[in-house]
Amino acid sequence: MNIDIANIQILDALNSLAAGLFLLCAFAMIATRQVKGCLRLFIGQSLFLAASALLLGLQHGSWHLYGVALVNVLSKAVLIPFILHVTMPREVYTRREINQVLNIPISLLIALVLTILAYYFTIPVQQAIDPQYRGHNLPIGFAGLLLGVYTLTVRREAVPLLLGLLAIENGAFFAGIAIAHDLPVLVELAIATDGLIVVFIVGVLIRGVQKQIGTTDVGALATLKEEVVE
Amino acid sequence: MSIIAILAIPLLAAILSFLPWRRFPSAVTFFACLAVLVLTIRVAIQASCGVPVVVAPKWIAVDGLSALILLLIAFVGTTAALYSLGYMAKTCHEPKKLRLYYANYNLFIFSMLAIPVLVEPTLVWIAVGLTTVCSAMLVSFENTRGALEAAWKYVVLSLMGAAIALLGFLMLFAALQAAGGGTDTWEGLIAAAPRMHAILLKTAFVLILVGLGTKVGLVPMHTWLPDAHSQAPSPVCALLSGIETTAVLYVILRLFPIMKAVPDFHAGTWAIAFGLISTGTAVLLLLRVRDYKRMFAFSTVEHMGIILFAAGLGSATAHYGAFYQAFSHTLTKSFCFFTAGALIISTGTREIASIKGLIRNSPVAGVCLLLSGLAISGAPPFAVFLGEFTIFKAGLAEGRYLEIILLAVFVAIGFFAIMWHINRMVFTTDKGDPPQKIRLPASCLVVLVISSLLVLAFGLYVPAFLQDLLRLSAAAIGR
């Protein structure tokens, strides 16, 4: 492909924009109480991931990355919300989380610290990467991963927890597309299918929890331990 | 060809399990697992000569190490299927739920069999992810509050680990690409490792160790394990505790020869540290368990620690010990959970404190519990003893006195903790009237006899072909 320098700079800038918005979505997911809002933000994040893959694909003329973008849009922006819609009980979406383990301003501060740490941790790895692939994908992807793990520790509601889980994978991918840009499409498809099965099974499980225990506040599930339960 | 059949049979059996005849799903599952076992033995004998059995060089191949894991999966799969035959018929009376159970069971076996058979690391990652989702419904099968809680923790933490490991696998792939390409298989990675960026390899290793370590149950990522391994129906526990953890640990061990290429990085040190922490924490928690299934679950954490520790030692003898330990742990732990199932049938409780005088009230369960307790805690002449002894010897020969002393202390604490609990259950005299005798299902009895005999036999004698497999496995992570 013959793209001149100016175009590459524009693509690079656009990719940085996508990366910034990706990170913004991750932050917003921590700050949102509504389950429905969380889902919308997750879809947004997945779309920015796809956009970044598309831009990197244009930049390097890599068909694999177009494949990644397409698979991502299809699975995460269309199929996963659809599966959630089918498997989840209706009232889950209208729930708001009142009791998070930490309040939201503190959560956001911690998220900020995690992002800085992500940049710090990825400095040595960045140096090992071919300069033309360097950019913001790796640190921001890693930050997305850490923020997802953080979400898992503070959230108590089942669906946001599941979305946090998927956000970790998004983060891993966001970092991954910058470095592993020639992953076979077969593997790509298999990973996406795996994600769909995960959502389906967890959806069924959440339904079971809701039926049996009467709530989707899975943070309240804490009966199995060594201490004597009074 | 037989390797393709090994993967295809469980899938077929999963579909057939939905057919509506009453006893059909359990029978089809058992015969499918038996067929897989026969085929794996064939493949293992082929692979034990030292030449890998290759189906598709870039995707599917079985070498000595894979064959060992494959053999273990197929063996526990078969005994647990036979055990399910009687156990599930006794504990679950809804035919529709049973069909679902067997369908999930076959899918779970399929996903585990895929781990050692695949050689493309990213696909192996997918297989590991599939084991979680296929077994989630098995863990929550009893649909009680506890079972659902356990399944939830299991799924969320395992998948979180898997997502972290994914970044590690993508980095491995990236490192391979940056090193000028090559086939993306375990072998290809080892060949290309000296050309790769050290920092990419190191980061990938740590991410994968932490990510998959969650699913192996390494401390401090073990919190879900005792829950899931105690709440599932007993035959499923045998699979989860006996082989699933080992199969995932196998993936971590596959990275060791790749890491040899990085001069200033010692994967072994990480393994020894994680191994000792896991073993130590597990044996201390063993002292205060109140549920005998949780006791066996913590003992799994302990043994995963021991195996990882042994793999971290440098010599070929230590690696041989690691795989012998993995082998004997799988046999013994499945026996332990089969015993736990027999206890549940004959006493109806999982609480250690409420079981007394077992040797008088239900002699079969009592004897099995005593045997399984002695076997898993490493008393001679059982197989686990031989494994631990080999590891101690190898460690001392390497001059790692401090680490070996620590490990020996932990193993001793584990022994006393397990035997203390079991002694209370088996021998304490029961003041009340002896409860009504409950007959164990015949299939459960058969499995208990087979497992106990094998656990004893392999402690006394290791057949030549198995020795070859163990030696090949040791060589596969030690070069």
Image (cartoon, coloured by chain):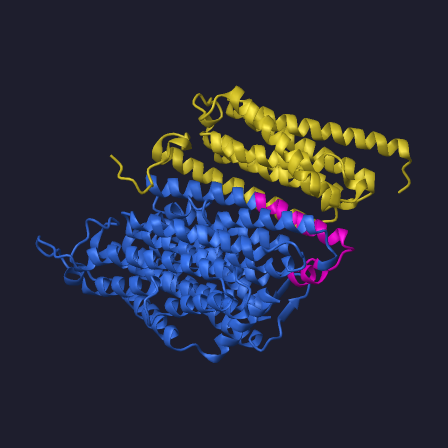
Q: Residue A62 location, x and y as percent? A: 79, 44
Rendered location of residue B347, percent (x, y): 21, 54
Work out whether residue B388 or residue B234 is closer to the camera in this orientation and state it: B388
The residue located at (58%, 37%) in the rendering is: A168
Q: Position of residue B206 (x, y in %)?
A: 59, 48
Relative to B421, say whether B224 is above or below: above
Task: Please say whether residue B177 is one of the residues in the magenta stretch.
Answer: yes
Which of the 4 quarters of the picture holds residue B124? bottom right
| Residue at x 54%, y 70% (from the top left corner) | B316
Colour-to-chain, blue: B
Q: Is residue B178 left or right of residue B376?
A: right
In the image, residue A161 above or below residue B73: above
Residue B144, quarter of picture: top left
Q: Residue furthest bottom?
A: B464
Task: Give the residue displayed 75% in from the left and 44% down from the top.
Answer: A129
Q: Is residue B228 above or below residue B16?
A: above
Residue B401 location, x and y as percent?
A: 46, 62
Residue B91 visible within the image = yes
Hey, which quadrant is residue A2 in on the image?
Answer: top right
Residue B404 within the magenta-colored segment of the rendering:
no
**Drawn side of residue A78 relative to residue B447, left or right:** right
Please name whichever residue, B8 or B429, is drawn nearer the observer in this view of the structure.
B429
In the visual, does B413 lie left or right of B393? left
Numbered range of the magenta stretch = B164-193
Name the residue at 56% across, 62% down: B116
Q: Colour of chain A?
A: yellow
